[in-house]
Image (spheres, rainbow, N blue to C red):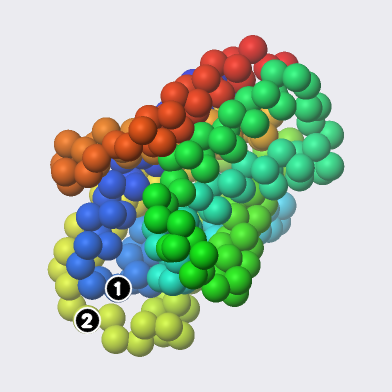
Amino acid sequence: MGLTYAICSLGFAGVNDVVFRKYGQKSRPVGILLALIGIVWASLFFTMAAVKGRLEMDLATVVMGSVAGIFSASANILLIEGMKRTGASVASTIYRLNLIFVAILAFVLLCEPIGLFKLGGLVCAIAAVVLFSMPENRCARSNIALKFIMILLLASFLRACMGISYKLASTYGINDEIFLAVNGLCWIVSGALYTFLRERDIGSNRSVLKYSLISGLLICGIVFFLKLAVNCMDASVAVTVSQFSFLVTAPLAVFFMNERITVKMALGMSLSVICIIIFSFAK
């Protein structure tokens, strides 16, 4: 069942990637978007907790939720900063390779086993991400400053730490709804800080509200199903599968944005499917 949850998270992420691409086609504020997404995120999960009668906020839940939320928000902000100078394809490649950090951290901190099936799946996953995301132009890769590569590596590491935090929360029996709601609160604070420290002029673009509502609901789906996935399977498997959002993004981008799928992208998508099949046999 955990693999099904991870695939659901993948699906929501794929649709959200398209929404983010559409949002980025015009000059719009990023910090406000993150903050508004955080409001949708926190509101939904606080409501879910209230409906279930689970609004209790003990110290462990607040701490774990804040740690995971800070990791998540920081990773996304660093991804945005790195993407400004490296381009979306290189940035997404490095960012999605957080699955390597997840595997290492899960082995060291969670004592998750690395059997032949899991190792084979991880190799396929890495190859899939590189094939799908790397740019065709070699010159584009060679002109990227080391500084921005390091920023993206840090973003990737923080995203991995978020995944491990989700697993640790389930290990200690943390309230899922409040845990996720606190994550959203961290996005509100981080988005506001990004706005005042980096953007200053937020403008008055009404489309931000529309995109934040749509993306906020999609991100709620991403984190909700990811949390369910890590609750019942290894974090290294759940997080890796959830990284294959391009399986959904690519076809949608072809249909709605007239993008094309190259041979490398097709091979990457095929390898990601093989990876999911291998993981279905992993113990």
The secondary structure type at the circle numbered 1 is loop
Query: Whole-percent x and y of residue 29?
Result: 30, 73
Q: Quadrant of residue 149?
A: bottom right
Q: Which residue is mark 2?
A: 203
Q: Residue at x 80, y 37 (%)?
A: 107
Q: Is residue 115 above or below residue 49?
A: above
Residue found at the far top of this picture: 281
Using the image as rendered, state which of residue 42 and residue 69 is in the foreground.
Answer: 69
Front position in the image: 168 or 83: 83
Q: How many marks?
A: 2
Tag 1: residue type?
Answer: Pro
* Residue 277 spot, x, y in % from top left: 54, 16
Q: Looking at the image, is 6 positioned above or below residue 84?
A: above
**Are the residues flagged by discs 2 and 1 in contact, CB closer than 8 Å?**
yes
Toward which corner of the image does residue 237 lie, by quadrant? top right
Pointer 1 residue:
29
Is any atom of residue 115 visible in this view? Answer: yes
Which quadrant is home to the N terminus? top right
For the residue pair 16 and 44, the one nearer the viewer reads as 16
Write the residue at 27% across / 33% down: 251
